[in-house]
Amino acid sequence: MTKWGMVIDLKRCIGCQACVLACKAENLTAPGVKWAWIVDRETGSYPNTRRELIPMLCMHCEDAPCVRVCPTGASTKREDGIVWVDYDKCIGCQYCMVACPYKSRYYHRDRIPYFSSGFTPSEEFDTEFIGVQAKQVGTAEKCTFCMHRIDAGVKRGLKPGIDWEATPACVNACPARARIFGDLNDPHSEVSRLIRVARAFRLLVELATEPTVYYLPA
């Protein structure tokens, strides 16, 4: 069985925010909502300081706290490991937001345009047309690994992580090739190889959520 995952190379990340913008454009997220974002911090004391960049997104945990606390089954995990929200089932209780240790969920409180003149044509775009479940006010939302791209690509015989049309937008947009996507259960995939040989680590492993997003040390 396929299990999708991602490896992020911290040596390669330059903090350009291309992944952030690609995610917003692909998933039509509202102002202030970032399914992908970058923690940019300075460590050390002057003059011995260092800049740290940590790209963040939903970790698509094997044992996802958000799924466990959801009272309606709206937060659910697919057989391929993708954790997603069924907006038709979500009642907006926000339990999942409290449970997520990675702070990767947002509450869709209202439809807000980017500009005071009103919604642009792209903001009015019917998301069902591109295969994304239309967002609903009063629901939680999060990164889906661009599952609409994965599903459509697989149906066409494409390989996520290799073929552009079947790969998450943030991976495609990275100019430094810091993001690698693929099947964690395939020992020959690039993500599996990097995890084996490159000292990959995961965030907050002490919580035993088993994230499927790995990082390579800077």
Image (cartoon, rainbow, N blue to C red):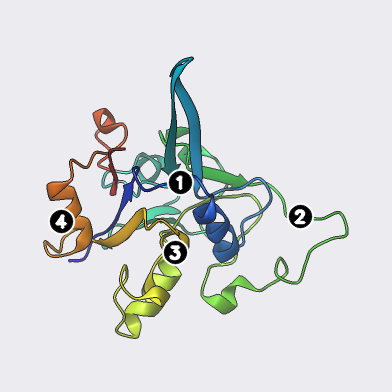
Q: Identify which residue is drawn at 61% across, 62% down.
A: 28
Disc 4 + disc 2, Cβ < 8 Å: no
Residue 14: numbered disc = 1
Dot 2 or dot 1: first in sequence order is: 1
Neighbor class of circle 4 (other Cα within 10 Å; few <14, some 14-19, many 20+) is few
- Which residue is label 3 attached to? 146
Q: CA distance from mark 4 to mark 1?
A: 23 Å
For discs 4 and 1, the disc positioned in front in the rendered view: 1
Residue 193: numbered disc = 4
Dot 1 or dot 3: first in sequence order is: 1
Secondary structure of the residue carrying numbered label 2: loop
Q: CA distance from mark 2 to mark 1?
A: 27 Å
For discs 4 and 2, the disc positioned in front in the rendered view: 4
- Which residue is label 2 attached to? 114
Q: Amino acid at mark 2?
A: Tyr
Neighbor class of circle 3 (other Cα within 10 Å; few <14, some 14-19, many 20+) is some
Residue 124 position within the rendered picture, expressed as x and y whole percent measured from the top left: 73, 69
Q: How many discs mark residues in the rendered view?
A: 4
Dot 2 or dot 3: first in sequence order is: 2
